[in-house]
Each structure stands twice: as C-alpha cells, then as structure tokens.
Image (tube, helix red, strand yellow):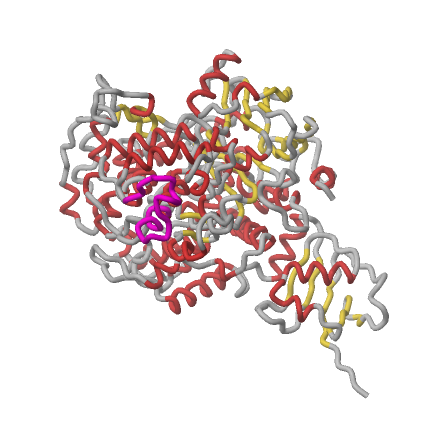
Amino acid sequence: MNIQDRVNALLERMHDTPQYATQGAVLFVDLEHRTHQKAYLPKEVLTTFLSGRGANMYLLYNLLATEKMEALDTEVPLIFGNGVFTGYMASATRGNVTSLSPESDAILDSNAGDYFPAFMKHHGYEHIVLYGRNPQWTLLKIAFDEIEFLDATPYLGLNNLDVTEAIERDFERTERKDMALARITSAGENLALSSGIMGGIKAIWARGGAGAKMGSLGLKAIMIDGAPGRIITSKEFKLGNKEISNKVIGTSVIRNALKTVGTPFLYKPSRILGAIGTKNNQENTWVEDLDADNFDVYRTGMDGCYKCPVKCRPLNDMTPGAEGGFGAHALKGVTGNASYDTAQAEVEHQHKASYQGIKGDGIFDRYDKGDGPEYVTVGKFGPNVGITAPEQVLRLNNILNDLGFDSSGTGGAIGWAMELYQRGIIDQQTTGGLDLSWGNYDAVEQLLFMMAKREGFGDVVADSGQAVATGKYPKEALDYRMTVKGLFQSDPHDSRILKAFALGLAVATRGMDHLRNRVTLEINARINDDAEFKAELYGGKVSAEPNAYGGKEYAVRRCEDTFAVGDSVGMCRFTTKLFNSPSLTGTEEFAEQLKLLTGVVMSSDDLLNAGRNVIALERMINAHRGLTSADDTLPKRWFEEPNTAGPFAGEKIDKQAFEALKQRFYEVSGFEPDGLPNSNWWNELSEVITGYHLKVNLPELPGVSRSSLILNRPVKDIQELRLRLISALPQAAEALNDSALGIAINDQLVVSSELGHALHNGDEVSLVPMLAGG
C-alpha cells in the first residue's frame, strides 16, 4: 500500500459530519497531485486519545507503512493538529506538528502557539495531514472550505522576517489580524535537521526537525486566510473560562515572573542549584551576568499568543532610543526564585544599556531587536557555548528566530562541535578555519548562517545529532553527544542532581526533552518539605530530596500523563498544573470544560488515562522505528562524571539505581519490562487505533522479555506472520526462523503445511517449540 491507499483505508473508518459539538475536520492534502479530502474522526478517538497531539499520533500510526521508512520520505506524512480547547479557552492556544523525526531516532512531535492553531481551528480544521511532493514548491492557502495550491517559487530562500513581509504584501493581509502563517526558512528548504516551522516572529514548531520535514514535501508555507468569525459558546463555558483565566493570572509564578520577565527567570535558580549545563555539560554553573534582571534594560514589553491572558514572551530592543525596563525589579524579593539560596532573591545587578552594535561601532541592524529570549535560548546560547554577555544572547536569539532554528537542537549541536574542537577530535581544517573556542561569539553567529545554507562546516552541524551516522564526525564523537534517542537536550538543566528530571529525560518519547514530563517542582524546597502534599500531588510517596531515587517514578508518571493531556486539548504547558505550579489548571477543570464545550463526559481520571494512552501509542510508533527500552537512557557523561558546583557538587547518576527506577516507572505505567504496553492494554488500544488485533503468545526468546505481543495491522497468513515477528523482534530473528518453532491458531496446532493458513482479526496465535524424535 502507498500513502494514498492508507489514506483511503482510514477515510473508510471516518465520518462525513462532526461527531460532537465544535469538532473540526481532518483535511488530507496530497501535495503531489494537489488534491484534498476531508472527514471527521470517530468520537472514540477523542475519548481514547483526546485531540491535538493524541489524535495526531492516531493519524500517524494509521498512515505509516508496515515497513520502516526514512523520515524525509514523502510517503511519511506531516500532521498539524490542534486541541479540542484551542482557540476557545484561556491559554489554550497550542497545536502540535507530528511525523517521524529526521533529527532523532524517534517520533517528531512539536508544540507551538501564537495564532496559527486557533485560526486553523476556527476555519473548521482540527488536523491537516500533508504528504507527497509536487515538482513546484507549494504555498497552501486555506480559507474555510476553499483550498488553493499556489506557486511558492517567489518565496524560496526567504527567511522568517522577509517571507512574512512578502506574503503580507502580496495578499494584502496582516499576520495575527486577518491571516495566520506556518512557514519554513532557507534552513528548512535545505533540510537542516534542527530547523523548525515558524508560526510567528518567534513561535516555532521546533523539536525534531519539523522544518526539514516540511521542506522535504516542497511546502514553503500554509496560509490560513481570514480572521476567525464570532465564537459562540454557552454561558456556562464562558464562566468556566473566566474562572480559569483568573486562576492562571492569579498564580504566583505567572503574576511575579511569566507576565513580567518571561521564562528567563528560571536561569537564576538553576545556576544557584548548580544544575545548568555549561560547555556541553562539562560544567554545571555559570555567571550571574545572564540572570533575568540583566535583560531588564532591553525589555520593551511582553507579547503573547491568541487571546492568552498571560503574555509571557519578552520583547527586546537594543537599538538607540528604545524604551526598555519593562518588568524591572519584578523578581526582587521573590524567594521562590532562589529557593536553595534565598538571600540571592534580593540581589539585583543594575546592568546598564551599553550596547553599541555587535561590533561596538555604533552600527545596528535588524537582529538588534526582536521577540524573546526564552530560558532555553539563554541557557543553550549562554553557558552551553561559553557566552556571558546578555547582548550577545539577545542577538543570537533574534538570528535564530529569523533563520527558523530550534535553539535547543541547534545549541546542542554547536556545543557538541565546540567540545570536539576543544578535545582535538576536529580542528580548523575540519571547520574550514572557524575557531570554535568556547565563548567565540563571532564564530557562533557565522555558523548559524552557514547551517541555514548548508555551507562549509555548517553542512556538518546542520546534521545535528546525526553527524556521526552521516559520516561527518568520527564514531568517538558519540562519547560527547548530549542526546537521548538522538535528540539533543531541550533545556539547559544539568540533571545529574535531579533524579526525577533525569528519569523524565530518559523515558521521554521524543528524545531528551523536558516538556514531556519535567517534574519542575523538584527544585521547589517548600513542596519538597511537605511529604503529605507531595504524595497527594503525584499519586505516590516521593522522596523529598531532589538527588534521591525513591518514588520519582510516581512524579514522572503523573507529569507525563498530565502534560500529554494538556498537549492534546491545546493548553499551554506554562499554564498547566505541575509544570511550574501545583495550583494551575489541571484535569479537573479540563473535564468540566470538555463537557460544557462538546457534550462529551470524561472524568479527571479518564483524562489522565487518555494521556497515558497517548504515551503508549507514541512508544508503539518508536518501537516501529526500532527503539527499545535500552534507548530509555542518558548520556554516558551523567553516569560517569560528577557535577562540579553548587550544594550538590559530586552528584552523578548511579547506573544500577537508575535502571531500578526505570523499571519501577514501567511498572506503575502499565508497561512491560521492554517499555511497551502490556498485552491486554495494547489489545484494547488496537481496537480503537486500527480495529484489528492479533495476539501472539511467545516462548522464551533471546533478548525478549515479554510473553506475548499484539499485532494491530492485518496479517494475511502464517508466512507473513513470521516475517512480521522478525521485523518486530529482530534480536530474536534466528530463533524465530527455527523450523522447530511451530504455530498454534486458537489452540489448534498447525501440523500440516503452513501455506494457505489464513489469519483473522481477533485470532490468538501461539509459537510452540516442537519436539521430534524416533
């Protein structure tokens, strides 16, 4: 079956009309033939996987071929999806982009906000599924039921600022007013693996190489043309929405930090704790110069996503005459921002606006003002690469926004290259003359532009964590690659101290990423000191010490379920319970609002179970890519090298204790020791995912820990079954090929030729070791 066959098969199981109130359609777009179809997902997809991220995974699973394919193959779809609350509820502005990742060895799944997801939802679409490639680059224009395939050739080579301006000019539209735009830059066109899809001046679907995937389809941009109309909901839903909005903006972390300075407030507590990745995690603390208040003089205001009451995105302007100072002194005296050294809450740095252009010559350009930075960018382009000046971090942030790069993956790749240069594994002959010494700002800026064009050494770094696999670095470089499942760490936290953080990074389904399950409250001393409250929060007894292993499986499990729900309903992570506060909006409020908006009744526990179903499905897709429980691990540095500073100096990850913690996490999650759902759960999910399930009971097999396996795509006969089992369990291929391994179907042993023995939906097959003698 090709992709169009798989789309048609899925359409047969979908509906022509909405299955519940406010449901949006799935728009299937064949870019090669420039055709489109739409249909609605069954209601059981919502009650099992919710919408947004969860339904994206449902679509991806059904549209992948049974054989393994490369992520950039045009037969592998790229899927935009938004949540059931997107555009309807306070802070529910988000949408996910999903596929297989070309940057990592796992799924691609990235979340972003701004205006595109809400505009897409209010034009009637919950998901857009894209596949194929036309010889001509495409601009896809969507205006409610009108779909147009336009020539994007005039926009090729343009980066974020210029392509937005050009499209606004050519169509006489203004982004965020009567148009929303998802677009790639030259980096995506050139398949740079850490490129993202821009959804605004700063908003980006960043993680996993979404820009490269969109570029592989020859798709420059998707334009949602026309402002949303009047949004009609019930009085009760509006009242609930108002309560949520008031709850969000009344929470201490929102009021004191996110609304005033944005996420850079997190730099100080990480630095104080000695938990900030420095020089590719060789060290774990850095200078005070990058504490959030050092950016005050350049912060001109705050911006936000569609109708969000928080507005957490700092704007920056270093040009002459700019009026900075927004949020100045906001963090002074906030002890929660320095919980392991409360005296530092009173420290302010009085940084002056002394910037005279990046060369100090009074010359300014477009990169001296912009949107951001986030804490991630401060960390990845500050301590991670050895930079200390706030002005240099701000400028690099603005360049990243224009070039369309994920600051996490790009910063990780550059930090890796710098350590390889430090160790002599690469030299200036390799880098084309670039001096990659720590803190060399000029080299970092130059390298970003080279990466976007894949020029010179930029072509090497544009391969991100795959640079060894593509033959551009020697194998020994892997010893210094700070990745999980091939993906660089998303945030700057060095997690040798924080064992819950470490577990979360290891088991996260898209790779080394804190946004999937980060137990952020582990650095909150007040919560750690209240054992009863902490146990209630996470559903199990969790050790108070951040460097202890006890009970951390409960904390990661509860966060992972909650955040999967948040993504799947469209809620921002920063306004979702457990990420930065125990008192933000959670599944209790989501359940009530879901009933009022759609009429669908799900309890708080139902939602948490749906979140866990999403994780299970993601693990099934990763297994299809060849990942195993051995990939739920951490970079070797964290096991072998202790951290060097802070109150927990000397900490590292104990391999044996970590493996025990991981197995406890699997157990409380309902996973087998191989990290995949137990067979009963897998069987139940398969009834919804594909409508097909075949249970295979297994004997003891080399390298296989489970006793049964579920196949949820049709298997014609025993011969195909054997091939499928070898594909699913390659470590046991020799044993599975053994002619002494017999087959029983529904307890009936096949004693004659296996040819012609058909298999059917619901069958139970057993592999039976046969004895022979005479």
Quarter of the figure that contains the C terminus: bottom right
Of 709 and 275, nearer the camera is: 275
Residue 538 x, y percent position in the rendering: 39, 55
Front residue of this view, candidates 763 and 772: 772
Specify whether 727 is left or right of 200. Answer: right
How many labels, in total?
0
Q: Up-down: is 287 above or below 169? A: below
Q: Nearer the viewer, residue 198 or 265?
A: 198
Residue 426 lies within the magenta run: yes
Q: Residue at x 65, y 52 (%)?
A: 686
Residue 121 at least partly seen = yes
**Picture coordinates of residue 217 (x, y %)?**
60, 33
Question: In the displayed structure, does residue 649 sit left or right of residue 91?
Answer: left
Instruction: Determine whether 46 is above or below 180 in the image.
Output: below
Residue sitting at x 65%, y 28%: 134
Tell whether 286 sits left or right of 509: left
Camera sees residue 585: no
Name of the residue lying farthest toward the front: 429
Q: Residue at x 54, y 27 (%)?
A: 220
> Within the magenta stretch, is there residue 310?
no
Q: Quadrant of the N terminus?
A: top right
Residue 344 in the image: state x and y as whole percent: 15, 45
Closer to the camera in the image, 80 or 524: 80
Q: Quadrant of residue 725?
A: bottom right
Where residue 648 sits in the image (x, y, percent)? 23, 59
Q: Which residues are magenta?
A: 417-437
On screen, residue 449 above or below 414: above
